[in-house]
Image (cartoon, rainbow, N blue to C red):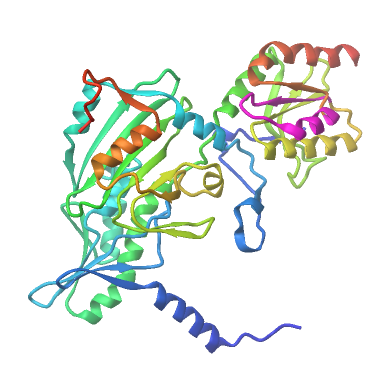
Amino acid sequence: MTMTVNVHTLEENISSRLRTAVSLEPRGINSYRVNTPFNFSDGDDLKIIINKSENGKWTITDEGHTLMYLSYYNMDINAGTRADILSSILKSHYMHEDGGRLILEADTEAEAADSIFTFAQGILKISDMTMWKKERVKSMFYEYFREGVTRGAKGRELNFNYKDDEYDPNSLYPVDCLVTLKNGHRAHIYGANSLDRANKAIISMYHYEKTGLNVPNCMILSDEMDFGKTRIMLEEVADKILSSPKSANDRLDPFLRKYEDAA
Amino acid sequence: MGQSDDLYIQGIRKNKTRSLGYVAEEIRTNMEVFVLTDAELQKLIDTPKKMSTKGLKKLLERKVENAYKRSDIELSSETEHSFYLRIRESLDDPTDYSAILSVKLKSGETFNLVRCNGSSHSHKNRIEKTKLFGTHIHVATERYIEMGYQSEAFAEESAEYNNINEAIECLMKITNITYKQTDENATLF
């Protein structure tokens, strides 16, 4: 039975959460740090300082923290597209930059209160530049795996990150590398630098075993990892286990030739 | 034959399943990329790195850029990767500073491994849902990289330093950065 949502209660809950997540910390005369529930992508809180000047006007500033945060990632925002985008974000959020400090000005306390979230949004958009085109940091193991397989395959055709449209239409059982043998048959090569990847490879190997394709498979492990009991499971399903990508240089070809000669 | 994607060209696709509560150990990803493991990250952190005399000079003579001072020092190591010590110090707030060890892998990817932060702000660990106050040290972890956060999005509180110079010394100690000094009793600053 679906329970009806009580909109007023939900609204009050959300409003109450947001209220308690915002607080002020005094820093000096008419100067406060504003704590909000928002964080940079590294988990650090936004830096928002609100000051009231002698003429009664309000200034919201980050004291230069946001551009300093961008520099943690060695990001150059002085030229090209990034400079244009920074300028655009500042303009659309009624902010400006002064000596590296981001600032939003308000005439009254009410206007300043309204502006806090606008300022926070502006800072978040600017800081998100550090996440653009960010790829997961890839392990060196993958590069070594590619090198080892490429050298060990001795000129055979390779398809890295292979997915089979017929036997794996939903891409649930990826093969790290498909090798086309000299007799036209296929072999599968898997790499693992973690237990999670080893377990995934085991699942893929069992899947292709059930298809009846009789595809030989080779597992290349990272020599920096102790696979413990997972190695025993690998021994039950893999036709060959190599202890490192480096050993693939010499040991992969003899393994593949066995299946070329046998066919 | 099916389709083949080259990871370097096509980028990353993933399927994620999560348990209720988003507990890190229960998050499983069907990723098609070998993410750096905690063991590999620790190896990078522990790799011996050396700072030259030229580097020390840069460390002591930080330059003003915008509203902060900075220096970026390349370190040497006996690996194929490049390491950098980065210092940032706010001009407006003496508690707002960072001492950072970053790495550029042989493959070209650059990210931060360890970062010693001042007490100017609090920090939230999004996976563990813990909040920290005061000086804290960020460290790159596999689980945060997998989730798509900044590599060093996990942090722990630290009582090892109270200012930028102490943060630099702390960072050098925990990330195995050395500088050869003629006087063994002298400190860096």
Q: Quadrant of residue A24?
A: bottom left
For image coordinates 50% across by 41% down, the residue present is: A135
Q: Nearer the viewer, residue B28 or B158?
A: B158
- Magenta highlight on residue B69: no
Which residue range is magenta in the image?
A216-237
- Residue B136 picture location, percent across and down: 37, 50
- Residue B180 left/right relative to A224: left
Q: Nearer the viewer, residue A241 or B114?
A: B114
Q: Is residue A86 above or below residue A22?
A: above
- Residue B104 picture location, percent across and down: 41, 30
For image coordinates 60% across by 59% down, the residue present is: B22
- Residue B51 picture location, percent across and down: 30, 24
Q: Is residue B144 at least partly visible in the picture?
A: yes
Residue at the left extreme? A55
- Residue A242 picture location, percent across and down: 72, 20
- Magenta highlight on residue A233: yes
